[in-house]
Image (tube, rainbow, N blue to C red):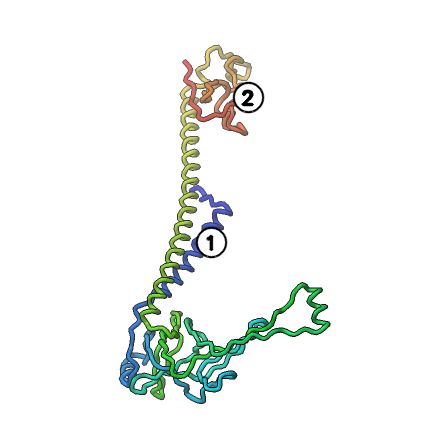
Amino acid sequence: MEEFPVRTVEGLCLGTSLAMSGLFYYIYRKKRKTDAPQLTLDRKLADLLNATPGKCLQYVVIEGAVQPLGEPLRSLFQGGSVGVVQKLMLREHKLVWNSLSNTCLVGSDQANVRVLCPLEASGLEMEIIHEKFHQASYGFTDIIGQYLSGEKPKGQLETEEMLKVGATLTGVGELILDTDRVLKLRPPTDGSEYFLSSADFESLRLEQEGQAVVWQVLASVFALAGAAVLFWVGRRYYRSLRVRWDQERLRREFERLGAGGIGAGSTSGATQEGAGEQVTPLENACVICLTQPRSCVLLDCGHVCCCYSCYQALPQPTCPICRQAIKRVVPVYQA
């Protein structure tokens, strides 16, 4: 069996397209998980989990009000603002400091679910409760350094964001019931995306469906690119096989003619030397080897000038007489 010819560039393109298609399809599968059941946050939820095998629901949606389990976080700039997640950012120096208080979602009848790892969730949007720009002040050495470096900082933008107590939050993740009968929402163990969002579930679902369509299109584009590369390689391989098959068929035909005495054996005027070998007349000898009879017609020029063995040995498929490109070869049938 012939070796399947894949060039380096083709193999690289094929591997890249398949890898990117697989990656985008994996992201698409994660984004399209819209069949998560939406549960009501009440006291019956613990009984439902207690009756579930493993006391775990792999991917569910719950909605409730944010409440701290301990002392809430207080704003550094707004005295009356308290929350459970706080972020202070100095944007110029890219210094980020996060604070986290234990968080839970509270339902209509005071049933609550403890939220684990909230900073790992997607879609967590916090309210900006403080924003102030601090103008930079420069000394003499700072001015010299700025002149040499060509950079002059303008100042620092100070922002404080907080997820306030009482805000409505939608959580999508894995719901478990621990040994103390405490409900906990955590990132899914199967790799599904973990969400905490201030939007309702329907808005969150529509947003994820829109993103899933984008990833699906990207996966399809790269899959089609890989298929196109594979088709190109297969087409080139088939054409090379066709050439080999034609050459093999032509070789067998010339061998059959030579064995039947139609080629060199039927040449008239042949003389015998002392060794008993047949000698080809000079006017019918191959112009290349001068020993074998002319046995093929070179087309499209139509010259009969060489034997088939010399034709196969030509470095370029051009006629030895006129240098025209040889498109095909047919055997000579001599009487």
Kind of residue sitting beneath label 2: Ile
Between 172 and 126, the one nearer to me in the picture: 126
Tell me the SS state at disc 1.
helix
Residue 260 image-quadrant placement: top left
Q: Which of marks 1 and 2 is nearer the N terminus?
A: 1
Secondary structure state at the residue bearing disc 2: loop
User: Mark on residue 195?
Assistant: none
Q: Is residue 221 left or right of residue 318?
A: left
Residue visible at 50% across and 20% down in the picture: 306
**Label placed on residue 16:** 1
- For image coordinates 65% across by 74% down, the residue present is 137
State the quadrant of the N terminus.
Answer: top left
Expressed as whole percent of the image width and height from the top left, the position of residue 295 reads: 46, 20
Residue at the disc numbered 2: 288
The alpha-carbon separation of the residues under discs 1 and 2 comes to 49 Å
Q: In which quarter of the image is the C terminus?
A: top left
Residue under the image location 29 percent in, 79 percent down: 53
1 or 2: mark nearer the eye:
1
Query: Is 118 rendered above or below residue 272?
Result: below
Q: Residues within 10 Å of mark 1 (few under 14, many from 20)?
A: some
Check the image and name the residue furthest to the top: 269
Q: Position of residue 154 (x, y in %)?
A: 61, 69
* 253 displayed left or right of 47: right
Residue 16 position (above or below residue 271): below
Front residue of 48/309: it is 48
**Circle 2 residues within 10 Å: few <14, some 14–19, many ≥20:** some
Q: Quick one: 270 or 159, which is closer to the camera?
A: 159
Q: Where is residue 40 in the image (x, y as percent from the top left)?
A: 28, 79
Q: Which of 176 and 116 is in front in this view?
A: 116
Residue appearing at x 36%, y 76% in the figure: 171
User: Where in the figure is residue 245, as x and y percent of width and height?
Assistant: 41, 33
What's the amino acid at mark 1? Answer: Thr
